[in-house]
Amino acid sequence: MTLAPVILSALTVFSGVNFTLPERPAQPYSIAVFGDSTSDQTTEWPYLLGRSLGRYRWPAKAISYQHYNRYAHGWSGETSIQSGVDAPLRILNASCGGWSAATFSQEIRERGLSHLLSETPDLILVSLGHNSIGIGTAYKVQLQAFLDLLPNVPIVLVTQNPQRPDWQVGEATNQRRRMESVRELVRERGYGLIDPGDVFTSRTLNGDWSWLNPGEYVHPNGEGERLWASIVLSQLSPMALPADSMHFGDRSRAPW
């Protein structure tokens, strides 16, 4: 089943910046990611994004991956995704399981931004909401307070997947409202937007939760994470992903 028509509907960028990656940066390039347990493992979308960028966008680049350790409050050693001769790309994944925008704000206030970001990235992707308490205006205030602490570089907000409504009364509705707040913030403040949440939601309307871990309420499985990475790649590098690789679940034809 091809995902191209579904993905195209998810790439609406309202009044936000339709940010795309440069063709071939002559200087080192880095992408920082702030998320939660839906993005903090090497089986999840930030790492998969690095792999697919290497395969389809920048095959001559040396690409590496680092992850922020929330327990040690420091960065892991670099993991090589691919070797290359061009200026390197670094994926700096600051995603931390259980964290929210408020948690990241507290980490920055207590330890400083330079502790959480060892360098100023060229692009920041922010995908938060599952662990937040506030909804509506309260959530927008929390998220904006965190975004205000980040460097003055392009920021793209990445929506999250919906939660199963049978997990905890009201929480699925709260998560949906938080993602609506993300889209509102894009319209109000001009951030970029990538909207995987819209794709996941469209599937749940047909009762399809196959992209979720069995017995789970929130975490996508391997299929779901590959879909998530495909959508992010499609927005950041529209020409990078061949049409025949956009087949959900077909690993032989996917970019991972």
Image (cartoon, rainbow, N blue to C red):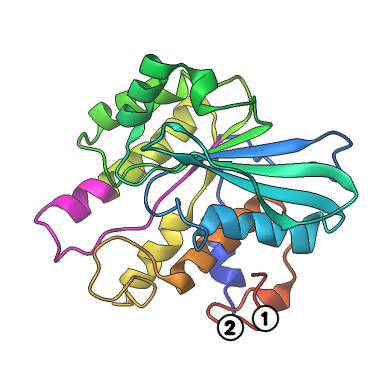
* Residue 200 relative to residue 240: left or right: left
User: How many marks do you count on the picture?
Assistant: 2
Check if residue 157 falls in the magenta segment. yes
The type of residue carrying mark 1 is Arg
Check if residue 241 falls in the magenta segment. no
Q: Secondary structure at mark 2?
A: loop
Residues 185 and 154: in front is: 154
* Residue 2 relative to residue 30: left or right: left
Residues 159 and 98: in front is: 98
* Residue 33 relative to residue 175: left or right: right
Q: Magenta segment range?
A: 156-175
SS majority, magenta: loop
x then y, percent, for residue 173: 20, 52
Cβ atoms at labels 2 and 1 below 8 Å apart: yes
Q: Secondary structure at mark 1?
A: loop
Q: Report which quarter residue 181 is drawn in.
A: top left
Residues 27 and 229: in front is: 27
x then y, percent, for residue 67: 52, 44
x then y, percent, for residue 27: 85, 33
Q: Which residue: 89% across, 46% down?
A: 86
| Label 2 – label 1 distance at C-alpha | 6 Å
| Residue under pointer 2 | 250
